[in-house]
Image: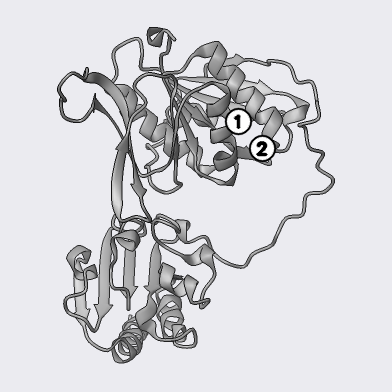
Amino acid sequence: MNLEEYKGVYVFAQQVDNQISGIAYELLGKAKELAADLDEGRNEVVAVLIGSDVKGLADSLAEYGADKVIVVDDPELKEYRTEPYAHALSSVINEFKPEIMLVGATAIGRDLGPTVSARVATGLTADCTVLDIGDFPLQPLPNQEQKHKQLLMTRPAFGGNTIATIACPDNRPQMATVRPGVMQKIEPIKGAKANVVEFNPGFTPNDRYVTIKEVVKAVSNTVDIMDAKILVSGGRGVGSPENFKILEDLAEVLGGTVSCSRAVVDSGWKPKDLQVGQTGKTVRPNVYFAIGISGAIQHVAGMEESDLIIAINKDEDAPIFDVADYGIVGDLNKIVPQLTADIKAAIANK
């Protein structure tokens, strides 16, 4: 493999029902950062858009940082299926030779990423939380060449008890899946027009092409906590599922949303869709209330980028206070209802 042939930072621009998923814009933002640390001529940011009748979505990818958009458009790509999508993306990689390939760690990306990496004979680091360009090994080692400008992919390991930084110095592309909500979108460049390259490797259905008989879409009344501006999050310290009512009252008066820690989900008190943390969702609200949450590293990793963190816990030594902007030590059963009442009164007196 001639590594010099591989250039550019590529992003799989996931779309569902002809709508670009938010993770695509987040990955383009990170791709721009990574590209800035690569050599001139090797730092183009490219979005790979796969689907049926999707060319009209290309300009939105340009607005969020794509220098070029490769469009693979075919009726066989109307709904996501592993075989045709894997054929499309692996064909793009073999044809255009990206140095870096980023995929969102969504339900689609977690299926597509490993399949494609196997087909193009490279490694894949899954569920990354940090991506950087740097030297590998991180520190020089005797009798081992230290390679420069490598993609350093950082992810939790061993259940979140340690952090591993992984590189792929001898194969290309360097591939990673990245959890939604971890990376930041850039401010959109209004009016940007995409430099579109159309590419179709040809699709011949075979015995690996599944047939979709019916698509049933679930209707959920649950607000996506990743979109919430105010989150009132509860942990095991709330005491019971019934006691979440006081958190719901606080969230209602603030116009916020209730979320929770893994312990709450494991206890069956709340659905996993509301879980914040390494094994849940990564959130960045304007205000995050951590109520009855001890602050284990696995939880903190999912909310530490919140603009304002307010912790309420009876244990003054709880680790959550190390990341909180404001902390209240005391009984949440007294503090939360009083806080709710005071906010209601303040709103009424406006």
In this view, the residue farthest toward the right is 213
Q: Residue drawn at (62%, 68%), measured in percent from left and top?
A: 221
Q: Which mark is residue 57?
A: 1
**Where is residue 260, by image quadrant?**
bottom left
Check if mark 2's residue and mark 1's residue have beta carbons within 8 Å.
Answer: yes
Residue 20 at what x, y percent from top left? 57, 38
3D distance between C-alphas at marks 2 and 1: 8 Å
Q: Which mark is residue 29?
A: none
Q: Residue drawn at (40%, 74%), measured in percent from left and top?
A: 254
Residue 195 at what x, y percent from top left? 52, 16
Residue situated in front as seen by the camera: 123 or 245: 123
In this view, 36 is above or below 107: above
Residue 145 at what x, y percent from top left? 22, 17
Look at the image and name its color scheme: one colour
Residue highlighted by disc 2: 18
Q: Is residue 190 visible?
A: no
Label 1 sits on a secondary structure element that is helix
Residue situated in front as seen by the camera: 17 or 266: 266
In this view, 185 is above or below 322: above
Amino acid at circle 1 = Leu
Q: Residue drawn at (37%, 85%), measured in percent from left and top?
A: 344
Amino acid at circle 2 = Asn
Circle 1: is it few (<14), some (14-19), or many (20+) Cα within 10 Å? some
For the N terminus, the quadrant is top left
